[in-house]
Amino acid sequence: MIRGYHRVPDHRGRLVKEIPLRNGTLVFPKDKALEVTVHEDEHLTEEEGIVRVTAISKRRRSGDQWRRATRAILKMGLCLVCYGYGHDVALDAEWDPLRAAIAGDPYEGYLLIGEFDVFAMPHLKASLLTDSPLSLAAQLTYGGLDLVADLHPQAPSADVRAWAKQGKYQVMEIAPR
């Protein structure tokens, strides 16, 4: 979606012109506008002058995609721990459950998904969050996409849920398969 709106080509020079959805279509015309077509009005809501559109992916088993995205954020986080605190810290046994989750072992955890801002520039930012109820978390921001994953895989606590709600994050729970 970010590549489509900002007209960023892929490695082969192709642009995203539209994204078919189960409940409609997103079209990215050349004038940088975004056209949204939905099949039912129930997917549109308006709050305080903001129109919200619920886009439902055509892909089945989207939970697997979120699980894979979470693993990628966890891997990025472990790399940031290594970069920021050194190899000895990153290789400590404390991170064994994280390494197991990254390697594909079943784990319980969550991914925080921020509200998508289609107008944000497609800048990439990876960072560690230390000032939140999350023990230590990795945050990936790319354009209007904001994803946060706790580096100590566990179920989200009430404090985490409250922090997520205040920051307008959706909590996507990752359950062991």
Image (cartoon, rainbow, N blue to C red):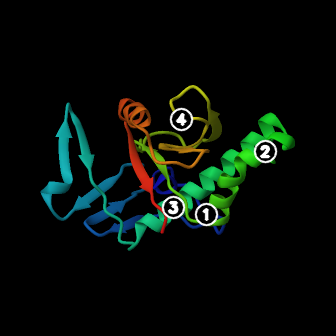
- According to the picture, the residue beneath numbered tag 4 turns out to be 134
Left or right placement of residue 52 versus residue 100 in this view: left
Depth check: 114 or 128 in front?
A: 128
Instruction: Name the disc covering residue 10, or none.
Output: 1
Determine which quarter of the picture holds residue 126.
top right
SS at badge 1: loop
Left or right relative to 99: residue 175: left
The residue under label 2 is 90
Q: Which residue is mark 3?
A: 67
Nearer to us: label 4 or label 3: 4
- Circles 4 and 1: CB distance less than 8 Å? no
Distance in Å between CA atoms under marks 4 and 1: 34 Å
What amino acid type should be assigned to the residue bearing mark 4? Leu
Residue drawn 26% across and 65% down? 24
Q: Secondary structure at mark 3?
A: helix
Where is residue 9? Give x, y as percent: 59, 60
Labels 4 and 3 touching (C-beta < 8 A): no
Q: Can the viewer see residue 31? A: no
Front one among 134 and 129: 134
Q: Amino acid at mark 3?
A: Arg
Q: Residue at x 62, y 56 (%)?
A: 72
Q: Residue at x 48, y 60 (%)?
A: 66
Q: Nearer the viewer, mark 1 or mark 2?
A: 2
| Residue at horizontal 27 percent and vertical 54 percent from the top | 54
- The one nearer the camera, 146 or 11, is 146
Q: Where is residue 129 shown, x and y percent of the image?
A: 60, 33
